[in-house]
Image (spheres, grey):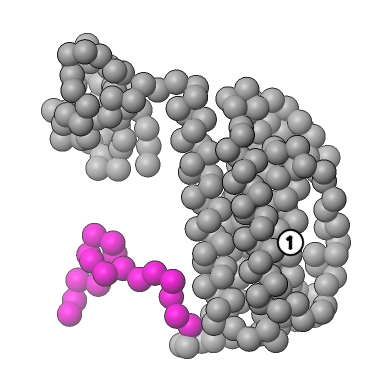
Amino acid sequence: MATVLFSDNEPGEAFWKRIGWKERADLKVLQRATPTRKPGIKSTRGIEVSSMELTDQTLAAAVIAETTNCLNSCVSKIKHCLGQLTDEQVWWRPQEPMNSIGNLVLHLCGNVRQWIVAGIGGAPDVRDRPREFSERRVIPRSELSRQLDEVVAAAAEALARMTPEEMLRVRCIQGFSVTGLGAIFDSVPHLKGHTQEIICLTRMQLGDGYKFDWVPKTTEEGASMTP
């Protein structure tokens, strides 16, 4: 959801012209707190206005919350796939040089631990990246799920301690010079991309037997308009 700042003394039409957007239902407008307007009031465009003041702290808190939500969402999707497979299917690979779901889970745990838990949180970086891809043991699904939960919980704790200054501080992660925000913008899309790969590998094996984690139920969500 996009976020912009609405000022009390700015006419509505000037506001929309300034941001260069047409009216959008997914636009979140943050209003500077003033004694003349009560929290929760509707703007003339019908968009909910919050009394929260936009500061570096509130922006940092929003980034942390969205990042944590994304991490948890990806883990939920991965575990949804693991729950439909046997241990042997988790370690199946289309071809020998390609990765299994098990390898991808190990790889994601290694990346999140290195980039967020260590890179942002300051924990020791003990990643063994080659091992993530060379592993051929059939590690049980329960153990893979446990490792996912553990690393994401540690990542959430590291993120919760981030200050606006830490988000902008440059640090070295995996040989790259990045800010705290850069680390987030690198690790989270990486996690989301491999999550979709895991879903694809699951569907390749289960075919029509695959159970979707979410399906649209209304036309607004994207369900078919035909009966």
Left or right of residue 16: residue 198:
right
Which of the pair 166/7 is nearer the observer?
A: 166
**Where residue 52 sits in the image (x, y, percent)?**
33, 25
Q: Is residue 86 above or below residue 167?
A: below
Left or right of residue 3: residue 31:
left
**Where residue 50 sits in the image (x, y, percent)?**
28, 29
Residue depicted at x 45% and y 80%: 211
Q: List the single residue furthest toward the left.
A: 44
Query: Is any atom of residue 72 visible in this view?
Result: yes
Residue depicted at x 62% and y 54%: 152
Badge 1 element: helix
Q: Which residue lies under the disc numbered 1? A: 107
Residue 5: quadrant of the picture: top left
**Where residue 222 sits in the image (x, y, percent)?**
29, 64
Query: Is any atom of residue 187 visible in this view?
Result: no
Residue extent of the magenta highlight: 210-227
Residue depicted at x 37% and y 37%: 2
Q: Is residue 185 above or below residue 93?
A: above
Residue 129: quadrant of the picture: bottom right
Q: Amino acid at mark 1?
A: His
**Where residue 25 sits in the image (x, y, percent)?**
25, 42
Mark 1, residues whose alpha carbon is within 10 Å: few (<14), some, or many (≥20)? many
Residue depicted at x 72% and y 50%: 113
> Quadrant of the image for the C terminus?
bottom left
Which of the pair 7/143 is nearer the observer?
A: 143
Residue 84: quadrant of the picture: bottom right
Q: Main secondary structure of the magenta part?
A: loop
| 198 in the magenta segment | no
Left or right of residue 138: residue 128:
right
